[in-house]
Image (cartoon, helix red, strand yellow):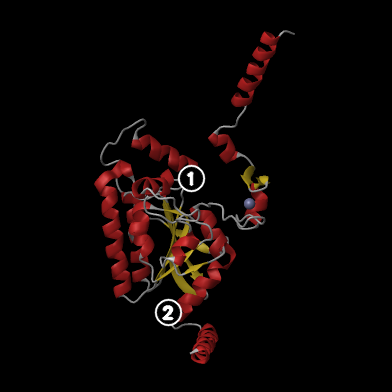
Amino acid sequence: MNWITKVLKFGEKIKTAIKKRPSKEEIENSDWTTCCKGPILKKELEENLWVCESCNKHHRINSRQRFDVVFGKNNYEILKTPIPQDDPLNWEDSKSYKERLKSARKKTGQECAVMISKTRINNINVTAGAFDFSFIGGSVGAAEGEAIIYGIQHAIDNNQPFILFTASGGMRMFESLIALSQMTRVTLAINELKKNNLPYIVVLTDPTAGGTTASFGMLGDVTFAEPGAIVAFAGKRVIQATVKEELNSDFQSSEFVQKHGFCDRIVHRKDIKEEIGKILSILLKKNSEVNSENLNETSEISIETREAS
Ligand SMILES: [Zn+2]
């Protein structure tokens, strides 16, 4: 075998290696995913609430998985939210928006990126919403805005707190100003909730960015976040190029935003239900057990502070 045939054979090998790479759909439909230690069975990950046991990475989950993990399977009821007219601007770029919507609905099995449910935490009835980031990047258009507003209205009508799990790239470009107006509409709805003295709890999950961070993502009475979640407005590279400074490696992580006062507490996925239950019991002055426990904690803290001073 001379060197030319060797080179040609090597070239063929590279070609087949590239060809054999699985497509995005194949990866999504496979039983496997990857984390720090290489391939991991999705089933194994699911048993651990989609959190990696080795590195504690909180993997992204869809709306139903979120409700399953937090409230328990079959322990909540999905509410049907209004769906406004699709594609009001007849948007088309490399693909039409209608087509994108069609494939997102097929892929996720939901009508829009936000799902609303009603359930109970700590014997308190609550209305909850959760984003699915795999639905066009969890972006917010008229349908998502309507879903959240519907959820808030349901909470007000039934005198319940509203909990929102965010995972969103921001407002949906394909709906332009109609999408941007959802920031204002949802903010006004949250104000109504607050006027009714009902708590609004936000749980920031990976990733929460753009207009979602800039509006209802930051309006919670209490804001929790999952460990290691990206919480941002503009992207890190854009900011780096603008300010011409090297940014920390943890820049825009939930730990970073907590340090800078944008989030109250970082909570592991397995503990979030308990944390929300506790805080709601305190805010609504329900479940005397939690309240007395908490009062003790508070008095301990004040004693410590007094001793320190
Ligand atoms: Zn891992």
Question: Compared to 14, does 124 lie above or below?
Answer: below
The kind of secondary structure element at disc 1 is: helix
In this rendering, position of residue 73 left or right of residue 168: right
**Residue 227 visible here:** yes
Question: How many circles with numbers are drawn on the protein?
Answer: 2
Question: Compared to 122, does 165 lie above or below?
Answer: above
The one nearer the camera, 296 or 277, is 296
Q: Specify the quadrant that holds the N terminus.
A: top right
The one nearer the camera, 228 or 135, is 228
Which residue is found at the position 42% from the left and 79% from the top? 283
In this rendering, position of residue 127 left or right of residue 35: left
Q: Looking at the picture, how far across and down is residue 198, in whole percent?
A: 36, 74
The one nearer the camera, 196 or 307, is 307
**Residue 118 visible here:** no
Q: Quadrant of residue 135?
A: top left
Which residue is found at the position 67% from the left and 47% from the top? 37
Local packing at callout 2 (Cα closer than 10 Å; few below 14, some 14-19, many 20+) is: some
What is the number of the mark on residue 141?
A: none
Q: Earlier in the sequence, mark 1 or mark 2?
A: 1
Which residue is found at the position 49% from the left and 91% from the top? 306
What is the number of the mark on residue 108?
A: 1
Q: Quadrant of residue 214?
A: bottom left
The kind of secondary structure element at disc 2 is: helix
Q: Looking at the picture, how far across and down is residue 309, in whole percent?
A: 48, 90
Name the residue tied to disc 2. Answer: 283
**Residue placed farthest to the front in the image?**
245
Check disc 2 and give the amino acid type: Leu
Q: Looking at the picture, how far across and down is residue 71, in whole percent?
A: 54, 65
Check disc 1 and give the amino acid type: Thr
Question: Compared to 189, does 2 lie above or below?
Answer: above
Q: Looking at the picture, how far across and down is residue 259, in whole percent?
A: 46, 66
- Measure the C-alpha gap from mark 1 to mark 2: 35 Å
